[in-house]
Image (tube, rainbow, N blue to C red):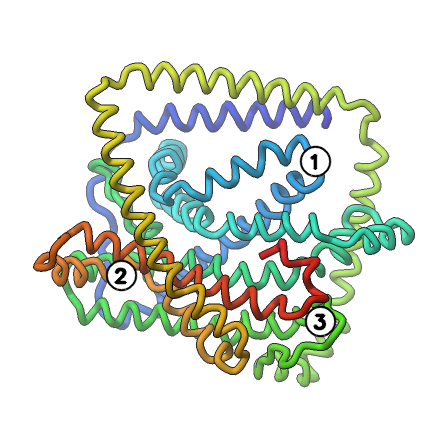
């Protein structure tokens, strides 16, 4: 860690603080762009939403490789980064909205700020499980493979590309599927949101479904959900299934799997002469030059690294000072809250905890047994997993008008509808992880990697 790095970190901290302060001075923006409910607008809206999810996924991978590697390689960093990551993944996506959106809108044009805020919000729904998967994969790499990389004299980049990334490939692919499902699930919140009197909306599938719900146009709602399902199925056939078939080569087991993943699109690409020619004359030379460039950069970084750890100590010291200042400011704010308000907060916290606990218990009651059964039967899994992925991607808030109308006449009313929405938002993820765990680690030879679930 050099002095230049410390200066950069200090500048980033000042910019973030300045953005938060400027957020309170932004002018009110009344009304967002008009969202057309015509079915003809859906292809363009779908393209815009896919672009935002792809951008958020790229940002998630960058964060994953950086943050997860730091936590896995440093015991001191691990003690701070992992609890922080656990807390951040529990924060609802809308809690990130005010600071992210208002900070961007204070520094950038409204449309640019809204686009960036939407990408960052989708990022917060994708990144956490990817980071945990990458961290667990790094921690469970066998020592024998590490020793082989040392014998061959691989630098950090070569270890990343030839050892760490292949070892974590299957885990990252499976968790990427769930991350994309999370991105689709929160698409309504990321494309159509309001902050006070400010109305921020972006044309896309999420805004289309939100507008259909607000207007009570169930025909348009059906078109929007249908378009979302079509995009999900398209990605499943053209992206995720080919990646699973390709990534199966990196699976560590003593006995070959009963039925490895297959993909018609992957087989078509493998048998294509055009793809083979492009791979030999374009992709392979590009990757070789890229490897050489990053290898030289890694070697220079290693040679230029200071022998002492004073830079790291100073960084930790600044972080500790910043943490103390932040804790003091937070304590100042909390002391201004009256006892009456603390009682209201405690009551609301207890009610929310009860609803979430009941919804999670109901989800676990049926999803874990069903998920295990699906995972143990590969034929069922081939048909049911895409359906679970689709169901997990449909925004739960799209069902809220229907659930509210149905539950108002029942005991519990809105409380019952809120619990059902929580159940919809949790059950598919638990079911998917249960079934995926059974498929990925079916034999005792894979017990070494079971901690990556």
Which image quarter is the N terminus in?
top right
User: Image check: 411 left or right of 347?
Assistant: left
User: Image check: 54 left or right of 227?
Assistant: right
* Foreground pick, 203 / 2: 2
Mark 1 to mark 3: distance in Å? 30 Å
Mark 3 to mark 2: distance in Å? 40 Å
Q: Using the image, determine if residue 8 lies above or below residue 220.
A: above
- The residue to which callout 3 is attached is 249
- Residue 430 sits in quarter: bottom left
Q: Position of residue 254 (x, y in %)?
A: 76, 71
Mark 1 to mark 2: distance in Å? 45 Å
Please report the residue visible at 51 percent of the width from the left and 54 percent of the height from the top: 57
Q: Position of residue 122 (x, y in %)?
A: 42, 50
Please report the residue visible at 71 percent of the width from the left and 59 percent of the height from the top: 167
Helix or strand or loop: what does disc 1 sit on? loop
Q: Residues within 10 Å of mark 1 (few under 14, many from 20)?
A: few
Of the two numbered discs 1 and 2 on the same chain, state the one appearing first in sequence: 1
Which image quarter is the C terminus in?
bottom right
Mark identifier at residue 311:
none
Q: Residues within 10 Å of mark 3 (few under 14, many from 20)?
A: few
Q: Residues within 10 Å of mark 2 (few under 14, many from 20)?
A: many
* Foreground pick, 76 / 182: 76
- The residue to which callout 2 is attached is 208
Of the two numbered discs 3 and 2 on the same chain, state the one appearing first in sequence: 2
* Disc 3 and disc 2 in contact, CB within 8 angstroms: no
Q: Using the image, determine if residue 400 lies above or below residue 245.
A: above
Q: Position of residue 13 (x, y in %)?
A: 52, 25
Please report the residue visible at 68 percent of the width from the left and 61 percent of the height from the top: 447
* Foreground pick, 72 / 143: 143
Mark identifier at residue 74:
1
């Amino acid at each position: 860690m050099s002095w230049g790095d410390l200066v950069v970190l200090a500048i980033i901290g000042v910019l973030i603080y300045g953005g938060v302060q400027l957020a309170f001075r932004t002018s009110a923006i009344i009304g967002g762009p008009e969202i057309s409910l015509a079915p003809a607008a859906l292809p363009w809206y779908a393209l815009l939403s896919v672009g935002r999810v792809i951008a958020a996924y790229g940002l998630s991978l960058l964060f994953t490789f950086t943050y997860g590697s730091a936590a896995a390689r440093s015991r001191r960093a691990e003690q701070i980064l992992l609890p922080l990551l656990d807390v951040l993944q529990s924060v609802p996506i809308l809690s990130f909205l005010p600071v992210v959106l208002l900070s961007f809108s204070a520094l950038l044009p409204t449309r640019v700020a809204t686009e960036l805020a939407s990408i960052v919000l989708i990022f917060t729904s994708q990144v956490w499980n990817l980071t945990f998967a990458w961290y667990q994969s790094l921690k469970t790499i066998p020592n024998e493979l590490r020793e082989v990389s040392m014998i061959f004299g691989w630098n950090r980049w070569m270890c990343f590309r030839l050892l760490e990334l292949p070892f974590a490939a299957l885990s990252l692919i499976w968790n990427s599927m769930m991350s994309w499902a999370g991105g689709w699930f929160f698409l309504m919140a990321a494309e159509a949101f309001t902050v006070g009197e400010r109305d921020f909306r972006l044309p896309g599938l999420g805004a289309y479904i939100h507008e259909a719900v607000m207007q009570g146009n169930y025909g348009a709602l059906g078109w929007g959900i249908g378009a979302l399902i079509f995009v999900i199925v398209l990605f499943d056939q053209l992206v995720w299934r080919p990646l699973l078939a390709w990534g199966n080569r990196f699976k560590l087991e003593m006995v070959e799997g009963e039925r490895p993943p297959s993909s018609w699109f992957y087989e078509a690409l493998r048998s294509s002469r055009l793809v083979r020619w492009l791979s030999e004359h374009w992709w392979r030379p590009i990757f070789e030059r890229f490897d050489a460039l990053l290898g030289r950069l890694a070697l220079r970084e290693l040679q230029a690294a200071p022998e002492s750890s004073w830079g790291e100590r100073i960084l930790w010291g600044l972080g500790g000072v910043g943490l103390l200042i932040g804790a003091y400011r937070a304590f100042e704010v909390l002391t201004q809250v009256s006892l009456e308000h603390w009682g209201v907060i405690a009551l609301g916290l207890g009610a929310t905890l009860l609803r979430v606990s009941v919804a999670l218990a109901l989800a676990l009651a049926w999803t874990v047994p069903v998920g295990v059964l699906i995972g143990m039967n590969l034929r069922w899994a081939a048909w049911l997993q895409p359906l679970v992925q689709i169901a997990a991607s449909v925004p739960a808030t799209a069902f809220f008008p229907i659930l509210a109308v149905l539950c108002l006449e029942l005991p519990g009313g809105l409380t019952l509808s809120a619990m059902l929405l929580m159940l919809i938002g949790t059950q598919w993820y638990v079911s998917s992880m249960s079934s995926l765990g059974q498929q990925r680690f079916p034999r005792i030879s894979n017990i070494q990697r079971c901690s990556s679930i």
